[in-house]
Image: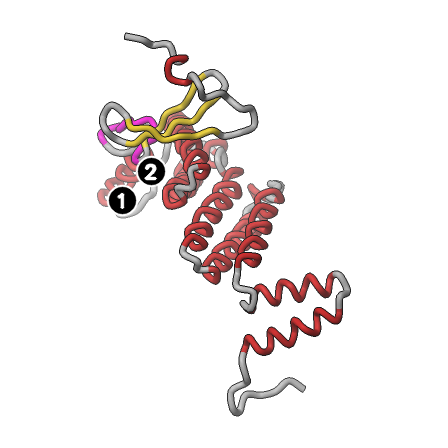
């Protein structure tokens, strides 16, 4: 049996700063994801836990603890008295890192539905730790990642909408994601010092991408172009764009009050 990884990665050079990903079919006949790293490669299952393990006979540790919580509530009538020990939190953080590595690879592969699935799960885990970790440091251990995971989840859902040419939905998703990140920083004392500027910048650029891909006569795109014209003090173009926006919105209904 040959165990040298060079037989697997020959011809697939590692490129610093780049996430190199491919899909292969494993010996079990199922699709796998492989990511090139500096000393070899990482391999993930496409579904379930990325390393293929089934802790306690279920798909993940998070699912196991969620089931344990549900049983606790059935017995006691509430979640009072349920908590996660530090070792359990450590294991959940390790599991979270596995999912993080996989959804980065999925994003490169443009498997956006899978990115949405894994990032939604990651947000659920952050909530779970914040609610049930016994030690304060464990409760807050993943909170600083909430903005990044929300950004990745928003990008995945936005690109799914764009792939269906649903520009209005894509714009709504990205703007809602930006508001969510801004609100979580403002409302959560644990995150008040967290810098989410890079996440917001990514989503702001994605918003511009959506507007740029919209039909030329779409009202949101015209309003975006109008603001750009005003910023540049191009008042002639701004006036033209106002006329286009008025036409795009259509005539006022009978009886509708006019502005003074």
| Residue 150 visible (yes or no) | yes
Q: Earlier in the sequence, mark 1 or mark 2?
A: 1
Q: Are marks 1 and 2 in contact (CB under 8 Å)?
A: yes
Label ID, residue 31: none
Which of the two residues, 65 or 11, is positioned nearer the viewer here?
Answer: 11
Classify 205 as above or below 43: below
Q: Quadrant of the N terminus?
A: top left
Indicate the position of residue 204 as horizontal and vertical percent values: 59, 51
Q: Residues within 10 Å of mark 2 (few under 14, many from 20)?
A: some
Viewed as shown, does residue 36 lie left or right of 208? Answer: left
Q: Which residue is mark 1?
A: 73
Residue at image position (48%, 35%) is 142
Q: Which residue is mark 2?
A: 82
Which structural element holds mark 1?
helix
Classify 166 as above or below 204: below
Indicate the position of residue 82 as horizontal and vertical percent values: 33, 38
Write the start and end of the magenta stretch as one range: 47-57
Which of the two residues, 95 or 76, is positioned nearer the viewer here?
Answer: 95
Which of the two residues, 206 or 142, is positioned nearer the viewer here?
Answer: 206
């Amino acid at each position: 049996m040959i165990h040298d990884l060079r037989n697997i990665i020959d011809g697939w050079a590692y490129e610093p700063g780049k996430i190199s990903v491919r899909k292969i079919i494993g010996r079990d006949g199922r699709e796998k994801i492989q990511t090139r790293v500096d000393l070899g490669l990482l391999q993930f299952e496409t579904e379930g836990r990325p390393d293929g393990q089934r802790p306690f006979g279920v798909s993940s540790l998070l699912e196991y603890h969620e089931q344990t919580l549900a049983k606790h509530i059935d017995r006691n009538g509430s979640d009072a008295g349920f908590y996660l020990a530090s070792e359990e939190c450590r294991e959940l953080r390790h599991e979270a890192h596995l999912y993080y590595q996989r959804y980065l690879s999925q994003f490169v592969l443009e498997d956006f539905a899978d990115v949405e699935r894994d990032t939604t799960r990651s947000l659920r885990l952050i909530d779970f730790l914040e609610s049930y970790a016994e030690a304060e440091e464990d409760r807050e251990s993943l909170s600083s990642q909430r903005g990044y995971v929300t950004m990745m989840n928003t990008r995945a859902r936005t690109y799914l909408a764009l792939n269906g040419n649903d520009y209005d939905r894509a714009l709504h998703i990205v703007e809602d994601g930006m508001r969510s990140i801004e609100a979580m920083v403002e409302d959560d004392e644990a995150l008040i010092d967290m810098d989410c500027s890079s996440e917001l910048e990514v989503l702001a650029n994605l918003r511009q991408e959506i507007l740029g891909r919209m039909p030329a006569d779409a009202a949101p795109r015209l309003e975006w172009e109008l603001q750009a014209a005003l910023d540049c003090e191009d008042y002639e173009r701004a006036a033209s764009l106002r006329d286009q926006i008025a036409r795009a919105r259509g005539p006022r209904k009978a009886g509708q009050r006019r502005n003074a």
